[in-house]
Image (cartoon, rainbow, N blue to C red):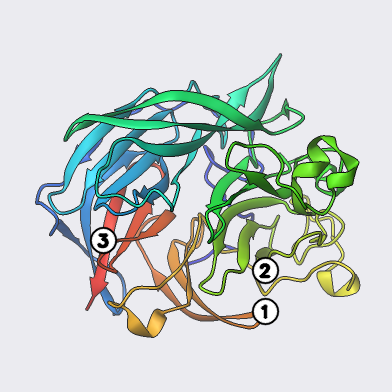
Amino acid sequence: MFLAGASCGEAATGDSTPLAAPEPTPPSTPAAGIAIGEPVQLEGEPPFTAASLGSFAQPWALATAPGTDTLFVTERAGTMKFVDLPTGRIGTVTGLPQVAYAGQGGLGDVAFLPAEFSTELGGRTIYLTWAEAGEGETRGAALGRGTLVCDSDTQCRVDGLSVIWRQQPKVTGGGHYSHRIAFSPDGKYLFVSSGERQKKTPAQDLGTNLGKVLRLNLDGTPAAGNPFADRGGVSAEIWSYGHRNVLGLHFDASGRLWDLEHGPAGGDELNLVVAGDNYGWPIVSDGDDYDGTPIPDHATRPEFHAAAIGWNPVIAPGDFLFYSGALFSSWQGHALIPGLDSEALVRVSLTDERGSEEARYPFPKRLRDIEQAPDGSLLLIEDGTGGRLLRLTPE
C-alpha cells in the first residue's frame, strides 16, 4: 500500500511534523539463529525470501566495511551497532558524538573510505553524520571523521572523531537534514547531501550550503574546481543546488552521481546530479505544499534540471543503491529503493537519464535503508523502534 500524502510521514520522523519527544531506546536484539536468521512472511509472491538478522532501535543507515563481512548500523538516538554477517553476532560501537535527537534529527549516515579495502576491521577511517545542537533552539547537520578501533569481536570505538563540515547556518526545526555521504569512484572526493531544513528558500541561495549537494576533499574542505568556487565561503562547497531533502546519494557503475529526494505532498524524485545545475526547489515541484497550495510543475520551467523519474503519490524513500551482485543477475544496474510510507522495495531501471519503475514489492513495515552484502544478497532494515534487519536472497 502507498499513501497519497506527504513524503516521510511518521510522527517521529515526519517530513513536516513538529519536534517529537525522544523515544526510549531499547537494546538491540540479537538474531535467534545465526546468519540464516528467522524467516519473515511477505505479501504476494516476491522473487526473494526474507530472514531477520536482529532488531535495532530506530535504525537510520547501513554500511559494510570494505573487505569485510561486517555491517554497521546507526541508530538515530545516538548509538551504533555492528553485525558479523557470517555468525549474526552483534557488537557495539562507542566514541560517538552527542546528537540533537528530535524530529528527524539524531545520528545519521556512516561510511568508510573505499580505498581502505582491508580484511582487518579496525584501524580504518570512519565518517559519520549527525544533527548537532546550536545556540538557542537551532540545529544543523555535522560531518565527522575518526578512526575505528576494535578491541574485541563485540566492541569497537571511534577514536579522534572531529567535525570536518557543518551545515551553515544552523536554523530552528528538526527536519530535512539529509546528511548522506558518497565517495567518488576514484576515492578522491567526498559528496554530502545537505537538506534545506524545511526552510525552502535556502535551496536557491548560493550563500548557504542548505538545499545543496556538496563536493568536498576527504578532510571536509571545498574541492578545487567546484562550480561556484569563485564566490568563496560555503559557496565553494556547492556542486548542485535547488534540492529539498536528499536521502539517497550514490554513484552508478558508469561513475555518474544520482540523488533521491523527498518531495512535499507528492513529487519524490530520482535525479542525475550534474555540476552547477539547479533542480528547482522550491520554485517548481511535481507535488504541492502540505496546505494544498499548488507549486508549478517542473515542466513549466525547463531551465531547471528535471527528474529522471518522479512519484506522485510519494514513495517516501529512505535511501537506495545500484545493484551490482550476481544473486539477482537480472537486477544489475537497477536502483533498489526502500520506501517509508509506501512500505515497499521499489525497483527502477535507468536508460540514459530516464527511469522506469519495474516492480514494487510490499513489506509489512516502513523501510529505512538498504545495503548490498558481499555475497550479493540484500540487507534491508525497517524503520522505527524495533526495526528488523532483513536479508533477502533469491526465491
Count of numbered labels shown in the rendering:
3
Q: Amino acid at mark 3?
A: Arg
User: Spatial distance from mark 1 to mark 2, Cα to Cα?
Assistant: 7 Å
* Drawn side of residue 43 relative to residue 266, left or right: left
Residue 338 percent location from the top left of the image:
45, 61
Of residues 133 and 285, the one nearer the viewer is 133
Residue 174 percent location from the top left of the image:
63, 32
Sequence-earlier tag: 1 or 3: 1
Q: Secondary structure at mark 3?
A: strand
Q: Which mark is residue 391?
A: 3
Residue 363 percent location from the top left of the image:
36, 64
Crowding around mark 3 (Cα neighbors within 10 Å: few <14, some 14 to 19, many 20+) is: many
Q: Amino acid at mark 2?
A: Leu
User: In this rendering, is residue 128 above or below 256?
Assistant: above
User: Spatial distance from mark 1 to mark 3, Cα to Cα?
Assistant: 30 Å
Residue pointed to by mark 1: 353
Residue pointed to by mark 2: 272
Crowding around mark 1 (Cα neighbors within 10 Å: few <14, some 14 to 19, many 20+) is: few
